[in-house]
Each structure stands twice: as structure tokens, then as C-alpha cells.
Amino acid sequence: MSVSQHVGYTFTGTAGEKLSYSTDADVCLWVFTPDNQIVKGGDLSKDGKYVIQVAAPEGVKTFNLHLSLGSLQIAVATPTPESSLNIKTQNDNSSNESSAQHDISQEDALQLVQKWYAAKPQIFAPPFETGLVDQLATGKLHTFTTKANGPVEWLRQNDAYYEYNYSEIKRVLDFSTSGKRPYIKIRVSEELYLHGKNGIDKNNSGASTNNLIYFFEKENGIWKIYDYRKVR
């Protein structure tokens, strides 16, 4: 890459995600939002396709560029102009996680997530079976779901509950057993309704199809769901 040549990459981002990068060369880098505004501070403000432009301030440069986007790590080396970034899902925000393989199969991971969806009507509606959370979840998901100001307690205190018409895993998009925590990426279609004192909350009800990543961690030798998040 020379001073007269800008190299461009694109990636899909979500509002609220944090972008950071490091490089082994003296290069200039700009990140543009989907509406062509420059990103300042690394915080993404919109959903959509972002553009990264890289330029050398002088001379000719070859370089390695490493970027992280929330739980995603991006590695770029010897760039090709106007390329789409090759994004590989990682299991943590750190780029130095272990590459160890874990003894959970895709079938086991999928079955665990299926159990979670099957349990949701009992967890987020009477009888609010938090014992099912103990069986299926650990770490962040367990803490968030069962904490004093978490969703289950909020439903109880507000005489509310979720009704699930269906929850269907449409397909597996990705699966990995490397890194700190294994994960499975799936596409899920779900129809649910939030019932409260004033009837159905239309803002938090209805049918949707989303891509989600579920992370797993062993607790006392048993694989459980550690966390999950919605992705594009």
C-alpha cells in the first residue's frame, strides 16, 4: 500500500458495539458509519455496513491489522483493496484467548439450546421455575436471569408473564469448540406475547426471526449456557 492508495474494507456492525484495533505499522485509519459519518471513539451508533479506510502517511507499507468488535475478532494481513473483512467469531473480547478444543459436539450444543427454549415458558411464566435456569445456565445468563432485579423477578412483581406460541431453531449458522468458550450460532424464529396488568404489551410481543450466538461453559463437569447475544 502506498501513500496514494487507500485500502477499504467493510463489516456489518450493530449500534452499541465497541470497535478497537491495533497494527504493526504507521498507518492512518478511518471508520465510516452506514450514512458516511466518521466514527469517533470506537462506539458504533448505527446498525448496518461500516467502511474502514486505511492509508500510509508516507512511502509504501505492508501491515497487519487486528480489530475487535465486541465478541468478534477481525484479522487483516496483506490487504486487498475494497475487500470485505473476514470476521471470525471469538468467545471473548480478548484477542489472546486460548485455542484449546472443548469436548462439546455441535449436536450437544444444539440440544442444550433446544432445552433452553423448551424451558422458557416455565421460566418466564408461572410457576417461574428458576430451578430450570440452575440446570441449563451458568455465568452471565444465570446471574442475569435470576438476580433480584432480573427478568424473572420483574415478571413476578408486575403480575406479568410471557406466552410462547412457538420457538423454532431454523438452522445452525456456525459452531466452534476453540477459544475460551465454545459457541453455536443459530437462526431462531419465535412468537411470544408479554401479558401484564393492562393486557398484551404490543411493543414487546409478536413474531421475529433473529441470529443468535450461544456460548457454553462447564460447571462441575456439565456443559451449560454461559451467555448469548443477538447478532446480524
Image: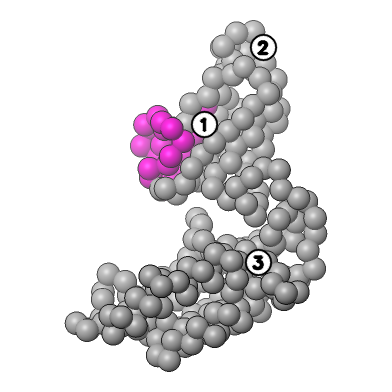
> For the magenta stretch, what is the residue range?
32-53
What residue sits right under mark 1 in the picture?
Answer: 52
Q: Amino acid at mark 1?
A: Ile
What residue sits right under mark 3 in the picture?
Answer: 216
Q: Main secondary structure of the magenta part?
A: loop
Render colour scheme:
one colour
Q: Amino acid at mark 3?
A: Phe
Nearest to viewer (mark 2 / mark 3): 3
Which of the 4 quarters of the picture holds residue 75? Answer: top right
* Quadrant occupied by the N terminus: top right
Looking at the image, is 195 positioned above or below residue 186? below
Q: Residue at x 69, y 72 (%)?
A: 219
Asked if residue 28 lies in the magenta stretch, the reply is no
What residue sits right under mark 2 in the picture?
Answer: 60
Disc 3 crowd rating (10 Å Cα; few below 14, some 14-19, many 20+) is: many
Looking at the image, is 208 positioned above or below residue 157? above
Looking at the image, is 59 positioned above or below residue 231? above
Residue 192 seen in the figure: no
Nearest to viewer (mark 1 / mark 3): 3
Q: Nearer the viewer, residue 204 or 128?
A: 128
Question: In terms of secondary structure, where does tag 1 sit?
Answer: strand
